[in-house]
């Protein structure tokens, strides 16, 4: 007698294998951390925020008759400015409310227009680490009106762009 | 022969059903999987960022409520439902520059966690939070919320905190002789009642501020900023420049501060005018809240009955909002704060003697202004008001 096999569930191995595969897929997906572009943007955004705040606060005088630290640093970029910028900027970006400071690095430049040949000139202002290429720095800027004669300019207030590359180890 | 061409195999039915159930199950599971992976932390960072922006860059709401005559920070606890949004900035035009009064009010212990959630964090989800502010000048840290867990959304803002102006009137202003005048504020004609006045010209204060009259550096007596001021008068028992002269001619004379009166005027008062064209503002030190705080020789004074004896110094603290109230929100106000001293002998009988007095001064009442010396002679050593200044601070927001 030939057994009637119509209606029988004889592929139970296949069903079991399918369930196992589905369960495995679930485990794999659950355990995988997908680092999306949106996540990197959050870190960058936080760095940009801190850097922008630091430059803005450095460009805010402590009282109505004082000059801002950033303005003084720019005006004396060839003498005492770099040391003052380094001390103040690092203090701003690394300070936290808790006892553990942050560990940010930066390199800062200034850019201004040379009126003799109408070119844009740049000069290093300060840095506390060198970019090696492996970092992922963010760029923050602040305009400063400096009461100083920059090379090639006449002696009147000049707009100077302070540009900082900021990254975290 | 059986014709079964149109039949559906039960194998197929079973397999297809299992597949569909599994497929639907997995399909509904996938969004949950990705939420579990990263989206919560992304959401927390965004909420922390938003909260940081609201606190650092927004003055809060109401920023100038006509009922209370100021911003949300002066709304009392029993009406705290009128506070719609916290914000610590001085004004909407001064991001990252915070008001010390708003900071004090924000970190007040009378707010509940729900108040912070509904007025600064927002969102339907019941977020946990920790908000801390470090004043690097005073080296103080204030925080609210719960201890930090391992993972949380985070935002850090660098800010500046505005400090009030104040003035200290000491022997440098009290006793320096001037041609034709025996001293600036030391009355060397005998009298048993001496008065010393300080006036505030609201037009100058709101219009002549430094740095282009920037709000960050103003001494603004009008709401919504309506700042407070501190007036210290010291060296009242000093031996002024000449060892043979003291502020009191007879050291045994007792001085009692018998009254502080506040008058306002909308018209320009002659400098030597004390009271006549001013209107009295009926305020009392016993009012609640008190219109000012008074300390004599370091002791808090709550009553002029009996009048407190003054030996060396007086501190008058006018809290935020009161100058706006005294001036009835009028930008043309001249406000005159007059301290009245009764001089007696040891038995309490009136005695005529020298003492602090502004009516005999070359410049009359003492003006609380940005740079009093510029209003007068260049080399005259008037007291300089300590201008409002900005101190560094760090605001951190953690949400989870």
Image (spheres, helix red, strand yellow):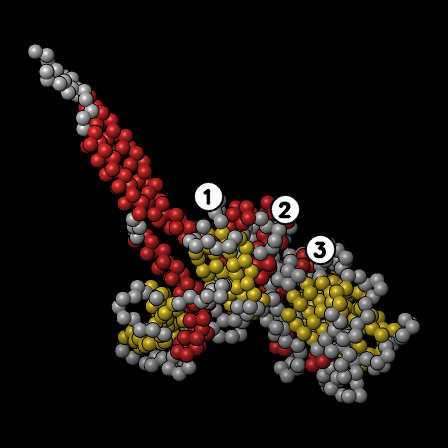
Residue A2 point in image, percent of width and height: 10, 17
Query: How far is disc 1 from disc 2 in space, using C-alphas?
Result: 25 Å
Camera-side mark, 3 or 1: 1
Chain under callout 2: B
Residue B119 point in image, percent of width and height: 53, 48
Q: Secondary structure at mark 3?
A: loop
Chain under callout 3: B
In the image, B117 versus A54, the foreground residue is B117
Q: Provide the residue designation for mark 1.
A: B125
Query: Does B66 sit left or right of B87 as displayed?
Result: right
Q: Provide the residue designation for mark 3.
A: B289
Q: Provide the residue designation for mark 2.
A: B79
Dot 1, crowdedness within 10 Å: few (<14), some or many (≥20)? few
Chain under callout 1: B
Dot 3, crowdedness within 10 Å: few (<14), some or many (≥20)? few
Q: Residue placed at 43% from the left, 75% from the top? A: A87
Query: How far is disc 3 from disc 1 in space, using C-alphas?
Result: 38 Å
Quarter occupied by the C terminus of chain A = bottom left
Report which quarter residue B252 is drawn in.
bottom right
Q: Say whether residue B91 is visible.
A: no
**Badge 2 vs badge 3, beta-carbon distance below 8 Å:** no
Report which quarter residue B325 is drawn in.
bottom right
Residue A15 point in image, percent of width and height: 22, 31
Dot 2, crowdedness within 10 Å: few (<14), some or many (≥20)? few
In primary-sequence order, the first of circles 2 and 3 is 2
Q: Secondary structure at mark 2?
A: helix
Query: How far is disc 2 from disc 3 in space, using C-alphas?
Result: 15 Å
In primary-sequence order, the first of circles 1 and 2 is 2
Report which quarter residue B29 is drawn in.
top left
Q: Residue placed at 38% from the left, 50% from the top? A: B42
């Amino acid at each position: 007698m030939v057994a009637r096999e119509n209606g029988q569930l004889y592929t139970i191995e296949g069903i079991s294998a399918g369930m196992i595969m589905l369960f495995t897929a679930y485990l794999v997906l659950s355990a995988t951390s997908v680092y999306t572009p949106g996540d990197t943007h959050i870190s960058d955004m936080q760095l940009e925020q801190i850097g922008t705040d630091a430059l803005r606060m450095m460009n805010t005088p402590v009282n109505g008759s004082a000059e801002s630290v950033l303005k003084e640093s720019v005006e004396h970029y060839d003498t005492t400015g770099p040391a003052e910028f380094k001390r103040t900027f690092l203090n701003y970006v690394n300070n936290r409310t808790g006892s553990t400071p942050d560990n940010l690095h930066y390199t800062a430049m200034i850019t201004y227009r040379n009126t003799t040949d109408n070119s844009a000139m740049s000069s290093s202002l300060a840095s506390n680490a060198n970019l090696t290429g492996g970092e992922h720095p963010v760029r923050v800027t602040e305009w400063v009106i400096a009461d100083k004669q920059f090379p090639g300019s006449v002696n009147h207030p000049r707009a100077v762009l302070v540009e900082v590359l900021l990254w975290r180890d | 022969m059986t014709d079964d061409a149109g039949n559906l195999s039960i194998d197929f039915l079973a397999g297809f059903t299992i597949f569909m159930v599994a497929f639907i199950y997995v399909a509904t599971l996938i969004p949950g999987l990705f939420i579990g992976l990263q989206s919560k932390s992304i959401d927390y960072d965004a909420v922390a960022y938003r909260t940081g922006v609201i606190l650092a860059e927004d003055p809060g709401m109401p920023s100038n409520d006509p009922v209370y005559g100021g911003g949300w920070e002066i709304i009392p606890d029993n009406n705290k439902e009128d506070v719609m949004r916290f914000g610590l900035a001085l004004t909407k035009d001064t991001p990252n520059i915070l008001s010390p009064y708003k900071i004090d009010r924000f970190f007040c212990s009378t707010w509940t966690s729900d108040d912070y959630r509904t007025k600064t964090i927002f969102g339907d989800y019941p977020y946990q939070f920790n908000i801390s502010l470090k004043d690097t000048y005073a080296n103080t840290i204030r925080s609210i919320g719960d201890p930090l867990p391992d993972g949380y959304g985070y935002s850090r803002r660098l800010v500046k905190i505005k400090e009030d102006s104040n003035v200290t009137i000491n022997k440098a202003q009290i006793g320096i002789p001037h041609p034709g005048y025996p001293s600036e504020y030391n009355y060397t004609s005998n009298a048993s009642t001496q008065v010393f006045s300080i006036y505030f010209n609201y037009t100058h204060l709101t219009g002549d501020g430094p740095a282009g009259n920037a709000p960050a550096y103003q001494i603004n007596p009008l709401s919504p900023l309506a700042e407070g001021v501190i007036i210290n008068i010291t060296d009242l028992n000093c031996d002024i420049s000449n060892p043979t002269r003291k502020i009191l001619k007879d050291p045994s004379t007792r001085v009692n501060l018998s009254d502080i009166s506040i008058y306002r005027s909308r018209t320009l008062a002659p400098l030597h005018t004390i009271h006549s064209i001013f209107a009295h503002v009926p305020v009392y030190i016993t009012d609640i809240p008190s219109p000012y705080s008074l300390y004599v020789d370091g002791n808090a004074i709550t009553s002029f009955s009996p009048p407190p004896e003054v030996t060396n110094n007086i501190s008058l603290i006018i809290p935020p909002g009161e100058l706006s109230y005294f001036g009835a929100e009028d930008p043309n106000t001249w406000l005159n704060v007059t301290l009245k001293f009764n001089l007696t002998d040891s038995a309490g009988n009136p005695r005529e003697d020298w003492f602090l007095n502004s009516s005999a001064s070359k410049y009359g009442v003492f003006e609380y202004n940005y740079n009093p010396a510029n209003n007068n002679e260049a080399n005259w050593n008037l007291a300089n008001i300590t201008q409002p200044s900005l101190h560094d601070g760090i605001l951190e927001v953690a949400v989870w």
